[in-house]
Amino acid sequence: MMILGEVSIGPMMHPTRLTPDEQYSHVSIFSLLAAPMLIGCPIEQLDDFTLNLLSNDEVIAINQDPLGKAGRLVLEEDDVQVWLKPLEDGSFAVGLFNIAGYGKTPESYFRWGDEPQKVFTLHFDKIGLKGRYLMRDVWRQKDVAEYTGSFQANIPYHGVILLKFTPIK
């Protein structure tokens, strides 16, 4: 169950303790895994941010892709996990998650508020992709650019960059 919006463990509702970047990561991994998107917050109390998280049609399309394949972890490098999901139309959903060493040190469990973004270069051959791709930022619903071989991204702390790679012939 996704822990977005107003949540509770017991009778008292409170806002999720996840940061906005962590909430993007939360919904992204559910989409990449083709997991049922169950929410535990009252629908009538959705704020604009949570409603936008749950109603992005491009993110939902990744989750509900007719091919039905779940994404998988294909690379973990420099505190970034890369998840890859093949889609029915021959494109790929790619999630770049800044895990920031989570679970490796005691301080990795906390947010101090000044955590830097991760600058990460993804080399396509490291995740089994070759050729030229049109990349689309799924959360922002806009095309980024055409890339061959690699590209560089700034990934927020505990955040994600969720992309759709469409092959260019």
Image (cartoon, grey):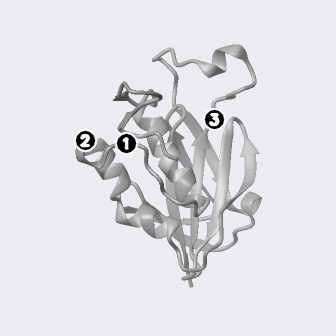
Q: Which mark is residue 80?
A: none
Reading the image, the residue beneath label 2 is: 45
Reading the image, the residue beneath label 3 is: 99
Q: Is residue 109 visible?
A: yes
- Helix, strand or loop status at disc 3: loop
Q: Amino acid at mark 3?
A: Ile
Q: CA distance from mark 3 to mark 1?
A: 25 Å
Q: Which sits in the foreground, 82 or 48?
A: 48
Occupied quadrant, residue 113 = top left
Q: CA distance from mark 1 to mark 2?
A: 8 Å
Q: Which sits in the foreground, 1 or 103?
A: 1
Q: CA distance from mark 2 to mark 3?
A: 30 Å
- Give the label, 3 or 1, closer to the camera: 1
Reading the image, the residue beneath label 1 is: 41
Q: Residues within 10 Å of mark 1 (few under 14, many from 20)?
A: many
Q: Amino acid at mark 2?
A: Gln
- Give the label, 2 or 3, closer to the camera: 2
Above or below: residue 102 compared with residue 3 = above
Earlier-in-chain disc, 2 versus 3: 2
Q: Residue at x 52, y 22 (%)?
A: 115
Earlier-in-chain disc, 3 versus 1: 1
Residue 92, percent from left and from top: 59, 69
Circles 1 and 2: CB distance less than 8 Å?
Answer: yes
Residue 69, percent from left and from top: 65, 72
Q: Amino acid at mark 1?
A: Cys
Q: Residue at x 40, y 35 (%)?
A: 20
Q: Residues within 10 Å of mark 2 (few under 14, many from 20)?
A: few
Circles 2 and 3: CB distance less than 8 Å?
Answer: no
Above or below: residue 144 compared with residue 87 = above
